[in-house]
């Protein structure tokens, strides 16, 4: 297990946005959170990634209590949320966007004097191209980000996260605005990556995403109302009622 929450709660103006939420993310898995708007999904990942402070409960990452650490501290431990990385700079090329993603990227005085910075730059470029090649966007390396499609921008976000050595990648609607064919390709890449990077994603496009995920949590009104495999969740009567909107 790479991440778990214990009775995690969050209040806004006295209203409970999260109510004693318990989730577990297995290492090497893709975990999906679903639920209607206002169910607490985004609040949950904001608390996990440090953007909101928990009012009750704990967040445990790889056995360490990381509750209420600042976002940059959470990121340094290997939890990368796509928008935690500075926004893609649309005037820069794909390669330039990837190269500026690593934390603590810079040269010490010693590196500058000895010329070690040249070797470090070469290693970064080699790593960047390997990641772009894996994601099948290496042919776009010299294109400005503003020229990319929505799906290609999603892959560029993933590339930037991998440059930061993500161990848990949190993504909020990674398939939004992506055509179905490319959405399938993105999810297939996630499956290939999951031995090295675990995933926690929020996504509404269940017709596409369910067959690729290992476990699903359904939320409503700040609570987990169901958990299990995808086919179990979509048949769960409470999930059908509150999320899919179907009633007998």
Image: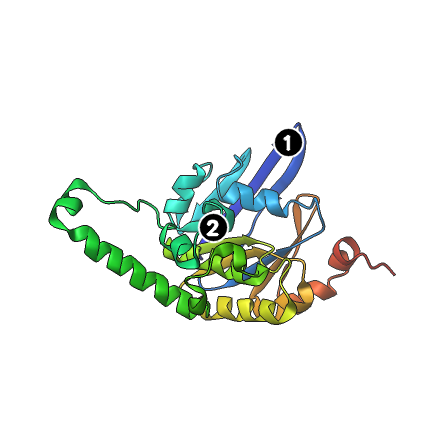
Residue 67, placed above or below residue 142 = above
| Residue 162 located left or right of residue 184 | left
| Residue 146 located left or right of residue 239 | left
- Does residue 195 appear anywhere in the picture? no
Pointer 2 local density, CA inside 10 Å: few below 14, some 14–19, many at least 20: few
Question: What is the quadrant of residue 141 in the picture?
Answer: bottom left
Quote the CA–CA distance across marks 1 and 2.
Answer: 38 Å
Q: Which residue is mark 2?
A: 91
Residue closest to the eye, 224 or 244:
244
Residue closest to the eye, 40 or 141:
141
| Residue 53 located left or right of residue 113 | right
Q: Residue at x 45, y 50 (%)?
A: 80
| Place of residue 147 in the rendered image (x, y in percent of width and height, measured from the top left) | 53, 58
Q: Residue furthest right?
A: 248
Question: What is the quadrant of residue 231 in the picture?
Answer: bottom right
**Contact, mark 1 vs mark 2 (Cβ under 8 Å):** no
| Place of residue 243 in the rendered image (x, y in percent of width and height, measured from the top left) | 74, 55
Of badges 1 and 2, the one in the foreground is 2
Residue 27 has which mark? none
Q: Residue at x 67, y 28 (%)?
A: 14
| Place of residue 27 in the rendered image (x, y in percent of width and height, measured from the top left) | 44, 61
């Amino acid at each position: 297990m790479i991440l778990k929450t214990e009775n995690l709660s969050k209040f806004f103006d006295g209203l409970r946005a999260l109510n004693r939420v318990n989730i577990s993310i297995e290492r090497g898995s893709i975990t999906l959170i679903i639920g209607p708007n206002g169910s607490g999904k985004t609040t949950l990942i904001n608390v996990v990634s440090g953007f909101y402070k928990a009012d009750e409960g704990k967040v445990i990452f790889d056995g360490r209590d990381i509750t209420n650490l600042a976002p940059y501290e959470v990121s340094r431990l290997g939890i990368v949320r796509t928008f935690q990385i500075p926004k893609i700079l649309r005037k820069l090329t794909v390669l330039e966007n990837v190269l500026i993603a690593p934390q603590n990227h810079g040269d010490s005085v010693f590196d500058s004097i000895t010329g070690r910075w040249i070797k470090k730059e070469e290693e970064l470029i080699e790593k960047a191209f390997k990641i772009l090649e894996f994601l099948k966007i290496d042919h776009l390396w010299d294109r400005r980000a503003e020229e990319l499609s929505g799906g290609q921008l999603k892959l560029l976000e993933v590339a930037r996260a991998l440059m930061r050595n993500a161990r848990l990648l949190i993504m909020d609607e990674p398939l939004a605005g992506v055509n179905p064919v490319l959405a399938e390709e993105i999810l297939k890449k996630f499956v290939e990556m999951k031995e090295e990077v675990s995933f926690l994603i929020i996504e509404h496009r269940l017709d596409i995403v369910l067959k690729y995920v290992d476990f699903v949590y359904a939320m409503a009104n700040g609570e987990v109302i169901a958990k299990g495999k995808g086919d179990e969740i979509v048949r769960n009567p409470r999930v059908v009622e509150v999320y899919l909107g179907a009633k007998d």
